[in-house]
Amino acid sequence: MARLDVNRSGEMEVFVRVVELGGFSPAARAARMTPSAVSKLIARLEARLGARLLNRSTRQLQLTPEGCAFYERATRVLADLEEAERAASIGEEAVGRVRINTSASYATHILAPVLPDFLASHPGITLDIVQTDAVVDLLAERMDVAIRAGPLKSSSLVARKLGDTPLVVVAAPSYLERWGEPRTIADLEHHDRIGFGYARTVDGWPLRENGKTNVVPASGRVQASDGEGLRQLALAGVGLARLAAFTVRGDIAAGRLMPVLGHLDTGDCETFHAVYVGQGGPLPSRVRALLDFLAKDGRVS
């Protein structure tokens, strides 16, 4: 057991500030200490742990592998301490920042419309939304929650299902006027099929014709890194795109996009989940509040 006269939480807090603020001087200002005191504290911490946490140069600080691991654990410990104090003093009111990783499509069409209600219900919570279709490491990127589409791989992450969405092939009226409407799989050979610029679980469009399912490659001249980018390209008349129904429902209703090849639809859907790191203990109330809200009001179906 560590000595009681060692302020481990204080050391962790200063170390985390050094990492997040990028240096001893800004961390010292935030902690109302001198830079030399911060430097000595970090040196004492490294000596006690028997590991170098930071590589120092005249221009920057760089975390060592041991420093990265300690930083991740320290942030979780400090969050748990803050949560414990808050629960004891104000009845577990949800307070603090929640970092969310999500696709631009989900952020635009599902999350943004319901956020005013969430923020009104939880005035103590602030949100940091990072948009990307790429699968990120939640710990490495310091994310609390990620919204992911498609089947989940086996991992230490815990998931809450947000529903299933059909996928629909669409095109702008201007594109169909120029190139005609495809009605068979063979017709697609003469059309630009806008695709994703990264590998997906099913890398193509499953279409069923004459009792047989074929996966047609999305092999157009243009690719995009996220679904919202594909939607904008389709709206501009660049080509055909196969997108989640919730992202184009309004465009179809307004006549900005037209569904095509519906008679060849296989009926497959894409599943959405909110995932988070399972730590074997209770979730911070700020994260639990967001997950509960998404499970109710952030569904794609």
Image (cartoon, grey):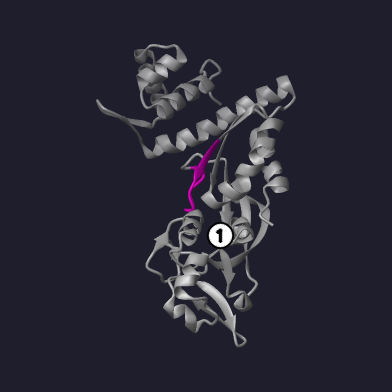
In the drawing, does residue 190 fall left or right of residue 100? left
Residue located 46% across and 59% down the image: 236
Q: Which quarter of the figure has residue 35?
A: top left
Taking the view exactly as shown, the residue that stands out farthest to the right is 91
Range of magenta residues: 128-139
The secondary structure making up most of the magenta span is loop
Q: Position of residue 280 (x, y in %)?
A: 65, 43
Q: Residue at label 1?
A: 256
Q: Is residue 26 magenta?
A: no
- Judged from the image, the secondary structure of the residue bearing numbered disc 1 is loop
In the drawing, does residue 197 fall left or right of residue 81? left
Residue located 59% across and 67% down the image: 168
Q: Residues within 10 Å of mark 1 (few under 14, many from 20)?
A: some
Q: Is residue 269 above or below residue 281?
A: below
Q: Is residue 281 visible?
A: no
In terms of depth relative to the viewer, which is nearer, 88 or 95? 95
Q: Quadrant of the N terminus?
A: top right
Q: Position of residue 260 (x, y in %)?
A: 57, 72
User: Mark 1: which amino acid?
Assistant: Arg
Q: Is residue 73 above or below residue 90?
A: below
Residue located 55% across and 80% down the image: 183
